[in-house]
Every structure is written in structure tokens, then in C-alpha cells.
Image (tube, rainbow, N blue to C red):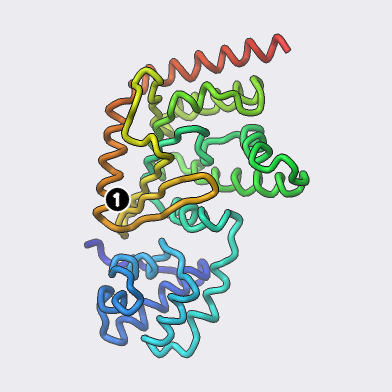
Amino acid sequence: MPGPRKLDPSSSPRALLGAELRHRRERAGLSQDELGAPLFVSGSFIGQLEIGVRRMQLDQAEKLDEVLGADGFFARNCAALKKSKYPDHFAEAAEAEARAEAIKEYAPLLIPGLLQTEAYARAVFRAYQPTAVEDVIDELVAARLERAQLLRDPTKPMLWVVLDEAVVRRMTGGPAVMTEALRHLAALILQHRIIMQILPFSEGGHAAMGGGLKLMTFPDAPSLSYLDGLGSGQLLDDPLAVKKYELTYDLLVSSAISRVASLALIESVAEDYAHEAQQL
């Protein structure tokens, strides 16, 4: 089990709550498992709260106040954690993503958010909300591009993506948008910033036909898996569930074409889109 990470309580509301939770738990002489029991959560979940990987919910905060005699401290401060630029079903996963040292993702239909260009993101959000005013779309795109700043670090997090072939074949936003989007992926691959493989149509059935999958590992907390659905998502920390989805990802990798062949396919399809855009 990794040792406790030193937190800077001033860095964020979540870090403040995590540092205070650890302080009060240790002062009460409780293990993480013992504190988790009355909340009906695992000890590893308490540990993730303490290091800021997981978001504290209001009902959990109220129970922690009761168990630790915190006089409403956690409930009062929990509201600050509710502010997010992301949809409720994805907010906690996005925050965990920002702390991960490695991310492995299977994308069945869309280029993952961390890898989207502005034009591609705008086309996606416009497809989701065809009647939304432009300001709403602008805010969504800005949040997505801000999230992508995670890749400005040249080495962390390690990002390994398996794209279904449908991602590169479905023309989202038109040929010019797809040309830019695929060339952006190719550039990241050539810069050795990401690992990417394509799962080809020719493979037929595979281990993740039910939807998208993201696996996140951390230097000081148990791994998480995130299952992506239509307007919904589920973040899982149960070790058995995470292990199951790690196997799923390994099966996807074994079914995907090589990195070299994947890059060649992405570049080839990008050229096809570029030629089509010139004809318009």
C-alpha cells in the first residue's frame, strides 16, 4: 500500500477536505476501513477522499460530521466541490483523470475529449444539442479544450487509446473538420505523446461492444475504471471490477492493429477527407 501523499490544503477545496478528513480520522484512532463502514463504502474509497481523487458527496459529508464530531465542517465545505464545468455523470471522472499517472481508454464512437480539436468538439456538442444557443456550445467547447491542457506535460499522464475504426470513419463536422482532427491525432502519435491503436471493423465482435471504457491509475491510490454511456457514466473503484475491465482492455489491445499500421490508417483516412474537402 503506498504511503500517504503530502497534501497542500490550500490548493483546492477537495485537498482541504481530504487533509482535514485524514487529520480527524487519525485523531479518532480509526482506520480507513473502520471509517468507511458506517458510510457503507470501502476503506480504499476513504483513502481516495483523503488524497482528493474522489469527490465527497453531501450525504457522505453529513455522516462524516456525525462520526468524527466535526460540527458540520464537511457538510459546510462540501458545496464548493459541487462546482464543475462538466456534466454530473462525468465530473468526478474528469477530476480523477487530471490526477492520473496513466490513462487507458477505449473509444467506440468519438475521438476522446482529451484529443479533440476545437472544431471537432464544437461539431460533437452541436450534434448533442442542435437547438442550443451558441453561448452554451461555446462554454462546453471551452471546458473540453481546457481539459485537454492535461497533455501539455510531455510525459504525464501516459495516454494509451484504442479507437474503434468507426471513430475515424464517421464524418463528424464535415471533411475539413475530420482532416484537422485526424492530423491532430497523427501529430500526437509522431511526437510520442500518446499510444494509439485502431480496432478494425474486420475484427468483428469484441470485448467492449457495450460502450466506452477508461482506466486510470494513480501513484498513491487504487485504480479506477469509468464506463461511458449515452448521457451517463459510472466510476468504479471496486478492485474486482477494475481488474475485470483491465482484462477487457487487454483483449481490445490484442484485437487492435499495430501502432504503425494504426498511424498509417489515420493518415490515409485524413488524406481522403482532405481530398473530399477540396472538392467542396
User: Of residues 131 and 263, which is closer to you in this image?
Assistant: 131
Q: Residue at x 26, y 46 (%)?
A: 244
Expressed as whole percent of the image width and height from the top left, the position of residue 44 reads 29, 65
Which residue lies most toward the left here? 1
What percent of the width, then of the height, locates residue 62? 46, 81
Crowding at mark 1 (Cα within 10 Å: few <14, some 14-19, many 20+): many
Above or below residue 68? Residue 182 is: above
| Circle count | 1
Depicted 71 relative to depicted 180: above or below = below
Depth check: 14 or 152 in front? Answer: 14
In this view, 274 is above or below 246: above
Residue at the image position 64 percent from the left and 25 percent from the top: 177
Q: Horizontally, is 229 left or right of 50 in the view?
A: right
Does residue 132 appear to the left or right of 264 in the view shown?
A: right
Residue with the mark numbered 1? 242
To which quarter of the image does residue 164 belong? top left
Q: Dividing the image into 4 quarters, which one contains the C terminus?
A: top right
Residue drawn at x 45%, y 24% as measured from the top left = 165
- Image quadrant holding the N terminus, namely bottom left
Q: Residue at x 40, y 34 (%)?
A: 161
Residue flagged by tag 1: what amino acid is it?
Answer: Val
Tell me residue 83's x, y (percent). 59, 64
Q: Nearer the viewer, residue 172 or 71?
A: 172
Question: In the structure shown, which secondary structural element does the residue marked by tag 1 occupy?
Answer: helix
Q: Nearer the viewer, residue 268 or 171?
A: 171
The x and y percentages for residue 68 are 37, 86
Task: State whether residue 92 is above or below residue 22.
Answer: above
